[in-house]
Structure formats: structure tokens, C-alpha cells
Image (tube, rainbow, N blue to C red):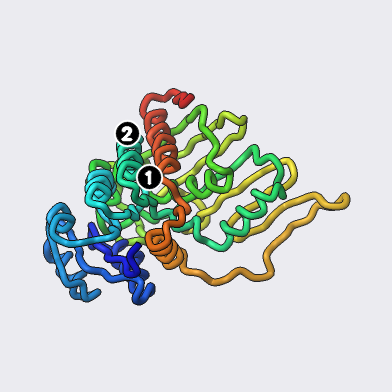
Amino acid sequence: MTDVLRIGMIGAGGIARDAHLTNYQKCGDRVEIVAVADVVKETAEACAEMFSIPRVFTDYQEMLEQVELDAVSVCTPNKFHAPATIAALKAGCHVLCEKPPAMTAEEADEMAQAAEEAGKILTYGFHYRHAPEVEVLKRFVDAGELGDVYASRVHALRRRGIPGWGVFTNKELQGGGPLIDIGVHMLDTALYLMSYPEPELVLGSTYQKLGNRKGVGVMGEWDWENFSIEDMARGMIRFQNGATLILETAFAANVDQLQEMNVTLMGDEGGADLFPLTIYQEKHETLVNLTPAHLPDINYHEREIQRFVDSCLTGTPPLSTPRQGVLLQRLINAFYQSAETGEPVKLS
């Protein structure tokens, strides 16, 4: 077991710089960032200069062959998650791959198999799992405070929050829109709180009503003329244990708030809203609301990176596992399949 984790970056865009590299640097002498690869040479060079990274590549395969690495962050567009992750695992690296796991469930399964065969850690960038609210609510759920959680609601909604940068509106590179980008965060969080129950049926609908026309944007001006993704997705999951989950996610919708990211749980002994955390119960013939008096102010990405480094250095299991990634990708793909066919998709 190494004392210093030698890190390589695959992808040098905004998420690599702002969420990964900035927080790797906070790990001090436990981490050495030794190489970065990006298909755009200028992007890789600018990133290397910003973070004092000694080796620069435009081909991650060359980086994996020429540089001795212990771990890799994969921060590419979604289309390249699977090949980059599998290549890094086969090269003997632990991998932190940004969300979503992949473009298809088959790719996610290949990634999980590669991690198992290599005996290396593979985890995903679901940074909301590291939120104090999630950690507290998870303890309450696991202790039975909510009883049988039989219903959940997931919101990941923006009023006019279509990203005006990157490839977020390119279906070929991303696989979809808000469902696979922000919806996947809250969906994963809900499933994590519910201990990832096995799904039985998915019914979904997608819409393209606002993104393909010029309009006001609060996250920059997007390319509305080449908008190839959904701007809203809605649907339901029924699980084998009888529980159900309702999902609503949008980059652009005519709603009140500019952004809402939330999970609601309902059980037979209590319920909860996640952000802000409030637990609803009936105690001593009284309906009561329970709220934390204090929660630590924590950067979710910072804690995610710290825990990934800990897992790599100590062998402790990561919070997000490859097999959970496979199940989550199956659900995402089932939503899109149902939306395309107009029929529910059976998963068991």
C-alpha cells in the first residue's frame, strides 16, 4: 500500500479543475498530481499550468502507458466514461468517475466487471451522498425512525438553467439532458437513502418545449438551434418491495424557484424532506417536525475527494459502488426507453 497517491486526470475541463483538482490539492502530502490528459491540447496545458502538473497528454492511453499512476479521475463527457474508466482499471488504477456512470447499463456493467477483475476501487461522483443532511437522514432511516419507507419523491428542477457551456445540450456526447445530468444526482441520493431497492417497473416521459427556442438563461446562453436533449423528464419507478418513487427533473420549466434539488421520503413511522432537513413524525398523539439545531458546513466535493483518497490508501470501501452504478444506469436508460416508446419498461 502506497503512502502517496499518484493521481492522473482524464479530462481537464471545469469539473476536473473546480471539483477534483482543487480538492486533491487540499489532501496535502497524501496526494501527488502527476499527469493530465485532454483531447484539446490547450485545455490540458492550461490545466497543467494552473495546478503545476508535470506531464501533459492529449491521449489518455499514452498517459496510462507512460506514467506510473495509482488512481485516476475521469472527467470527460459521458460518452467517454466507460472506455476511459475501463482503460484506467486495466492499467492498475483506482478510478473516481464523474456521474453518470456511463451511457448504457451494458457499459456500466463492463466497468463494474473491470473493477472486479482488476481488484481496484471504482466509485462515482455522486457528491450529494457526502452532504451532512444525507448522512444524518441515512442514520435515521437505518435506525428505523421512518419505518417502512414506501414512497419517495425526487426533484431536480431549474427554471431556466440550461448550461451555456460544455456539451450538456449534445445528446450524442451526453446521452440526454437533465435526467442524466442533475436528475441522476437526486435519484441516486433517494436510492441510497432507501438502500438501493431492486426496481420492477419504470414509466417515464420526456419533453422538449423550451430548450429548442431562444430565451432567457440564468446559466449562460445555450445553443438553442442545436439543442438535442430533453429539457424536462418526469416519471415513476415501482420497486419489487412495493415502494414507489416519483421523479421530476428539468433544465428549463415554468416553475417558481430558479433551482430546486430535493428528496422527500415517506414511511409508516415518519417522513422527511432533505434540503433543508426536516423529519416528520407522530409522537405522543402529536404531529411533530424534527430539524437539526446544527449541521457542519461541508464542501461536498471536498469530502468526496478526501474519502476517495482514503479508500485508495487504506482499502476501505467507497460510499458509491460499481454495482449501484449499474442499477442506476439501468433506471436512467429505462426512463428514456419508456419515454421513447410510450410504454412502461419492466426490469424484473
Q: Nearer the viewer, residue 67 or 216?
A: 67
User: At 39% from the left edge and 51% from the top edge, which residue is drawn?
Assistant: 123
* Residue marked by disc 2: 106
Q: Are marks 2 and 1 in contact (CB under 8 Å)?
A: no
Image x and y of residue 91, in percent: 22, 51
Query: In which quadrant of the rendered view does residue 104 lie?
Result: top left
Count of marks placed on residues: 2
Q: Indicate left or right for 86 with 191 as reference.
A: left
Query: In which quadrant of the rendered view does residue 52 lie?
Result: bottom left
User: At 37% from the left edge and 70% from the top edge, which residue is drawn?
Assistant: 23
- State the CA–CA distance, disc 2 to disc 1: 16 Å
User: At 53% from the left edge and 44% from the top edge, which residue is drawn?
Assistant: 191
User: At 52% from the left edge and 55% from the top edge, which residue is drawn?
Assistant: 256
Query: In which quadrant of the rendered view does residue 75 lie?
Result: bottom left
* Residue marked by disc 1: 180
Secondary structure, mark 1, is helix
| Crowding at mark 1 (Cα within 10 Å: few <14, some 14-19, many 20+) | many
Image x and y of residue 113, in percent: 33, 39
Q: Nearer the viewer, residue 258 or 57?
A: 57
